[in-house]
Image: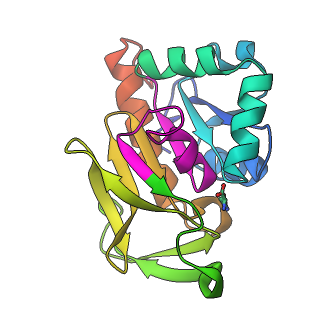
Amino acid sequence: MAASAAGTPLRVGVLALQGDFEAHAKTLRLLGAEPREVRVPGDLEELDALVIPGGESTTIGKLISSAGLEPALRAHHEAGRPILGTCAGLIVCDADHLGFLDVTAKRNAFGRQLQSFEADLEVGGVGDEPLRAVFIRAPWVERHGPEVEVLASYEGRPVAVREGTVLACAFHPELTDDPRFHAIFMAMTTSARERAGEEVGR
Ligand code: GLN
């Protein structure tokens, strides 16, 4: 696919401290990227982008601290390398945590009876066909700043957002066979690498 055309594949790290990192790796591979598991700061070197997967945000936050990963994550972000946060990963990126997104996420926001559900969403940037989204004890975006673009909402609550090089969603795009949400991220990653002067496919 476009990401790997004729050149070196995009190297996309997947934070592998906890949660469903393998499913993300599978989707990234399908899109022509080269996934790499990230556990220690050195794993963030030479990456084009990073996925922070779902799981349990408090646990992921603690594991980031104990692995000493926070400075390397900040450096990755400041270098303009894209980040995709899904579900707990969205929470980890919000203003109360790493602050990569000017949003405040509300944890487990959909309530007990809706801890786990699926919905067809209209998502900006994936075409006309609705995207089947799997929500598992999902957050929603309670507040967002003016620079934040809302790509999808469910029952009036933002569930997919983008701000600069950071993309995030409250659902689990890695748990369906539809790679279109990750494809948005791959397009952002291709542009970022081109901006960095290393053209993909040459
Ligand atoms: N409920 C979890 C949290 O608050 C997120 C759930 C998920 O990532 N599937 O961290």
Q: How many marks?
A: 0
Q: Residue at x 43, y 17 (%)?
A: 78
Magenta stretch bounds: 81-104
- Look at the picture and state if 35 lies above or below 140: above
| In the image, residue 36 lies in the stretch drawn in magenta | no
- Look at the picture and state if 79 lies above or below 101: above
Left or right, 124 with reference to 160:
left
Query: What colour scheme has been applied to the protein in the rendered image?
Result: rainbow
Residue 53 appears at what percent x and percent y? Answer: 65, 48
- Look at the picture and state if 50 lies above or below 143: above
Please identify the quarter of the rendering in which residue 34 is found: top right
Residue 91 appears at what percent x and percent y? Answer: 55, 48
Q: Residue at x 38, y 60 (%)?
A: 142
Q: Residue at x 45, y 33 (%)?
A: 99
Please identify the quarter of the rendering in which residue 108 is found: bottom right
- Furthest residue toward front: 96
Left or right, 84 with reference to 167:
right
Residue 2 visible? The answer is no
- Look at the picture and state if 21 lies above or below 74: below
Location of the C terminus (image quadrant): top left
Residue 199 appears at what percent x and percent y? Answer: 39, 19
- Choose between 38 and 102: the one closer to the eye: 102
- Choose between 181 and 71: the one closer to the eye: 71
- Furthest residue toward left: 146
Residue 100 visible? The answer is yes
Can you tell me which quadrant of the image ligand 1 is in?
bottom right
Residue 169 appears at what percent x and percent y? Answer: 48, 57
